[in-house]
Image (cartoon, rainbow, N blue to C red):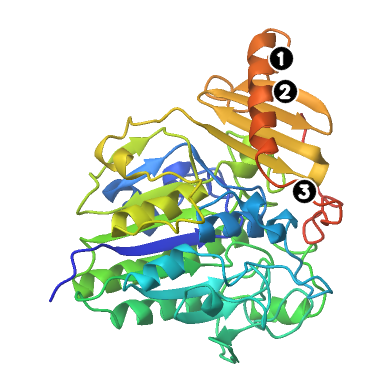
């Protein structure tokens, strides 16, 4: 008997910039239009592109807490780490197995569930995908992974199938894509599925399929500050795009494409080689370049092709959307903070009045978006921008619009007061530093 509920696929890139895709403005190293992401560009044409998709955080694991739970990441202690360190350390921090997740709620409702790729929400034995609702796991736990050695940034093996260490030769992006295809090929129309496909690409180290020798050179270094290029970076995105194409083709062959909702986005803004145009800032910044991310969705059965939405949204809204699409209610004791975006699929102009907000211990950053307006504070200095008229956040309107500044400042303070405080012992960005990068200009 065919189950009419939609299949759900959430594809998460790692550190991709807003304009790194062809459909969002990508250019090659020679400033000519390039074929970086043909399959994702086609997906955008076949569905909806969101111009104001925001990540829940400007760094990876806090966004992943929000995605997993559909709630403000600040409700969980582990999300105060910016991000959870790839070293195991003494702290036992992660996504508590007793906290309901999108995966656990869908699993209880009869969905097949799998996570392929990056977890970054705590280490076993205390935490892991299979403790938080995923029936299958194929991937790694740390914040980064070498594309050939399949080890964490400290050089320790970090490749797993469920709870078992795994060894497999190959380029990591391709292995994840192939595993996702395998999962899709094992599904049938009588039981819906939820697949989280969380790539490491285009996160450093900067390695393409042809760079096995470079991977051997940097083995054990931990970072790749002396390598990479725009061309290498774009090839990494292209490899990921090809793999996503394999998944889309598998859906088509299985006859599952029509009733599958697929979302593609990034966990935060881009890093060194990324194209965040027209925004300034990058990963770790609450400027638009750190939190405005590419966002595409396709669902042929419910979503019109060739549509564009300017509705501001957060990562956790897709958690609420997936549950709503599946007809699954949130846990009564853990109400969602994200909202369902199903209405925007019917009307691209739908845009509810609400605030999007962020906070980071890094540089004491605060931000709140209300419509076209954005309140920003960095290291005690306040800014007020109209991000529609001034997407590069160059014209600070705090003196011209003191009432609007006060209004948004108070809104941020009220929002912040309703959430647990950032613990003083929470570390600040041990993985990502700017010691070799220029400071953002405010």
Q: Could you tell me if residue 223 is visible in this image?
A: yes
Mark 3 near mark 2, Cβ–Cβ under 8 Å? no
Name above or below for residue 294 compared with residue 403: below
Mark 1 near mark 3, Cβ–Cβ under 8 Å? no
Give the mark nearest the N terminus, 1 or 3.
Answer: 1
Q: What residue is shown with label 3?
A: 422
In depth, the one of 192 and 210 nearer the eye is 192
Disc 3: CA contacts within 10 A as few (<14), some (14-19) or many (>=20): some
Position of the C terminus, as image quadrant, is top right
User: Residue 39, how many percent across, how many down?
Assistant: 36, 59
Q: What residue is shown with label 1?
A: 398
Give the mark nearest the N terminus, 3 or 2.
Answer: 2
Disc 1: CA contacts within 10 A as few (<14), some (14-19) or many (>=20): some
Which residue is at a point 41% across and 45% down the rendered structure image?
23
Element assignment for label 2: strand
Position of the N terminus, as image quadrant, is bottom left
């Amino acid at each position: 008997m065919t189950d009419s509920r939609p299949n759900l696929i959430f594809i998460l890139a790692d550190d991709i910039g807003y304009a790194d895709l062809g459909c969002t403005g990508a250019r090659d190293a020679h400033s000519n239009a390039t074929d970086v992401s043909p399959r994702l560009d086609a997906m955008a044409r076949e569905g909806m592109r969101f111009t104001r998709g925001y990540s829940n955080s400007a760094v990876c694991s806090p966004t992943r807490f929000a995605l997993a739970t559909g709630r403000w990441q600040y409700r969980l202690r582990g999300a105060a780490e910016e991000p959870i360190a790839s070293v195991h350390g003494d702290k036992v921090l992660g996504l508590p197995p007793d906290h309901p997740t999108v995966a656990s709620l869908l699993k209880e409702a009869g969905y097949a569930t799998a996570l392929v790729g990056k977890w970054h929400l705590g280490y076993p034995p205390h935490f892991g995908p299979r403790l938080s609702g995923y029936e299958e796991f194929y991937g790694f736990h740390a914040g980064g992974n070498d594309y050939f050695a399949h080890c964490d940034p400290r050089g320790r093996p970090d490749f797993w199938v469920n709870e078992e260490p795994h060894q497999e030769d190959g380029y990591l992006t391709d292995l994840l894509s192939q595993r996702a295809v395998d999962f899709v090929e094992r599904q049938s129309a009588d039981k819906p599925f939820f697949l989280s496909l969380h790539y490491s690409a285009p996160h450093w180290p900067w390695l393409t399929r042809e760079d096995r020798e470079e991977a051997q050179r940097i083995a054990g270094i931990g970072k790749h500050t002396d390598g990479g290029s725009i061309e290498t970076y774009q090839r990494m995105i292209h490899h990921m795009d090809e793999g996503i194409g394999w998944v889309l083709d598998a859906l088509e062959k299985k006859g599952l494409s029509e009733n599958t909702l697929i979302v593609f986005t990034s966990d935060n803004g881009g890093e060194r080689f990324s194209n965040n145009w027209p925004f300034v800032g990058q990963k770790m910044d609450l400027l638009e370049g750190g939190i405005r991310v590419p966002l595409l969705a396709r669902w042929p059965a419910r979503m019109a092709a060739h549509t564009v939405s300017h509705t501001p949204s957060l990562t956790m809204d897709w958690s609420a959307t997936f549950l709503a699409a599946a007809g699954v209610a949130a846990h009564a004791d853990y109400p969602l903070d994200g909202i369902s975006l199903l209405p925007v699929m019917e009307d691209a102009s739908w845009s509810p009045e609400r605030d999007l907000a962020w906070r980071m211990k890094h540089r004491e950053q605060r931000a709140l978006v209300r419509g076209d307006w954005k309140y920003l504070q960095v290291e005690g200095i306040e800014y007020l921008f109209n991000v529609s008229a001034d997407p590069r956040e160059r014209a600070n309107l705090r003196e011209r619009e003191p009432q609007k500044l006060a209004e948004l400042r108070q809104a941020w303070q009220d929002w912040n007061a309703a959430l647990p405080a950032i613990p003083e012992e929470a570390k600040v960005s041990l993985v990502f530093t700017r010691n070799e990068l220029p400071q953002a200009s405010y």
